[in-house]
Every structure is written in C-alpha cells, then in structure tokens.
Amino acid sequence: MSTIFGKIIRKEMPAQIVYEDDLVMAIKDLYPVAPVHILILPKKEMKNLQAMAKEDLSLMSHIVDVAQKLAKEYKIEDNYRFLTNNGEKAGQSVWHLHFHLVGGKELGSIA
Ligand code: 5GP
C-alpha cells in the first residue's frame, strides 16, 4: 500500500530532501517539533520497524550511519533524539517505516 512517503520517494509528491542514496531518503518533517526535524526513510516499503524482515536488518546500520552524518551536518551531534514510532498507539501516523532525527533545542527525557 502506498503512503505519502512512498509518493515522496518516487518523487510524485514534493518534499525538502536533505539526503538521498539508493537505499534511503531523508526529508525535512512538514510539521517540525524542533529546529531540526528530519525523517529518514528506507526506500523499500515496510510498514514499521516490527515489520522489517530479517534480510533487511543490515539496512539499520546504514540508517544509523546516515543519521550520524546528518546530526553532524546540522550541528546537533551532542543533543538529538533518534526514534521510530511503531504502531498507532505509539504515535505512528504514516505506515511507511521512518526514523525521526530531532534536535536543536532542549528535549528533556521521554521516559
Ligand atoms: P509518525 O507520526 O508516523 O511517527 O511520523 C510521521 C511524520 O510525518 C510526522 O512527524 C508528520 O509531521 C510528518 N508528515 C506528515 N505528512 C508529511 C508530508 O506530507 N511531508 C513531510 N515531509 N512530512 C510529513
């Protein structure tokens, strides 16, 4: 099932793309909760982290690598949050796996 992020990845919908390679795309969140709010999306469609197949787990190290590079580029490397919402009750609203990279302000603890 295609989602907004699927359309953005296929360039059928606009987005502020801050990074792209064969495996992932990173875009600015349309409704940022902090000065830096980037979404990192694997190009392969999967609805969330729990649905990620074993053979795709290596993608996680690439996503972390991209997140670290973007954190440096946006000068938030000492203070950021990197998370995914898995499931409706956890706040997931778009059913294409994505990771939030949030920073640029005091974030406090979520626990
Ligand atoms: P979730 O709630 O699924 O964890 O995160 C979805 C995120 O996508 C939200 O932070 C929301 O602001 C963002 N978002 C929703 N629609 C769009 C859109 O059309 N473009 C972009 N760039 N971000 C979007």
Image (cartoon, rainbow, N blue to C red):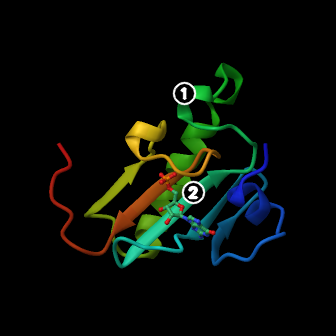
Q: Quadrant of the N terminus?
A: top right
| Residue 76 left/right relative to 43 | left
Label 1 neighbourhood size at 10 Å, few (<14), some (14-19), many (20+)? few
Res 45 quadrant in image: top right
Label 2 secondary element:
strand
The answer to whether residue 1 is above or below residue 82 is: above
Amino acid marked by disc 2? Ile
Which mark is in front, 2 or 1? 1
Q: Nearer the viewer, residue 50 or 80?
A: 50
Q: Residue furthest top?
A: 54
| Residue 72 left/right relative to 6 | left
Pointer 2 or 1: first along the chain:
2
Q: Position of residue 11 (x, y in %)?
A: 82, 69
Q: Which residue is mark 2?
A: 40
Label 1 secondary element:
helix
The residue lying at 73 percent from left, 77 percent from top is: 14
Amino acid marked by disc 1? Gln
The residue lying at 75 percent from left, 43 percent from top is: 44
Q: Quadrant of ligand 1?
A: bottom right
Q: Quadrant of the C terminus?
A: top left
Q: Nearer the viewer, residue 83 or 31?
A: 31
